[in-house]
Image (cartoon, rainbow, N blue to C red):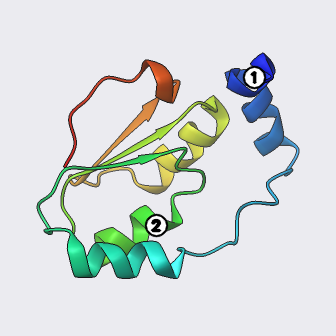
Amino acid sequence: MNSSLLDGNYWDDRYKNKETGWDIGYPAPAIVSYAEESIAKNASILIPGCGNAHEARALLDKGFSQITLLDIAPTLVEKVSKEFAGSPHLQIVCQDFFRHQGQYD
């Protein structure tokens, strides 16, 4: 794997330049449906590579209460942190997924 793909600057530049073709602009219906049908509302959930956090917003609206967002791009994490400021049910972490340590359901 290209080591630059694991670099926060690479991903940060993609967001700054609006090169985010993978972002569909809304929560992925399959993820939200799966969560509703299979995951307890109080489960500890990690959303790695959270991007614009569409799924997190949907899960919060559905009553999920322990969500951690993880992304390696500082610009994106700052944006998402502002959007979710004050949410007691959400933690946002700027970190490489492969270095993250945590326990989730």
| Labels 1 & 2 near each other (Cβ < 8 A) | no
Q: Which mark is residue 9?
A: 1
Q: Is residue 4 above or below residue 38?
A: above
Of the image marks 1 and 2, the number of the one nearer the N terminus: 1
**Residue 105 place in picture, x, y as percent:** 19, 49
Crowdedness near tag 1: few (<14), some (14–19) or many (≥20) residues, C-alpha within 10 Å: some
Residue 63 at least partly seen: no
Three-letter amino acid code at the position of disc 2: Glu
- Say above or below: 69 vs 55: above
Residue 24 visible at all: yes
Asked if residue 21 lies left or right of residue 47, the reply is: right
**Mark 1: amino acid:** Asn
**Residue 8 in the image: x percent, y percent?**
68, 24
The quarter of the displayed image where residue 5 is located: top right
| Quarter in which the N terminus is drawn | top right
Residue on which the image places disc 2: 55
Q: Quadrant of residue 39?
A: bottom left
Residue at image x 46%, y 66%? Answer: 55
Corner quadrant of residue 71? top right
Give the secondary structure at mark 2. Answer: helix
Whole-percent x, y for residue 42 in the image: 11, 61
Judge whether 87 appears above or below 12 on screen: below
| Residue closest to the eye, 23 or 103 | 103
Q: Is residue 22 left or right of residue 67?
A: right
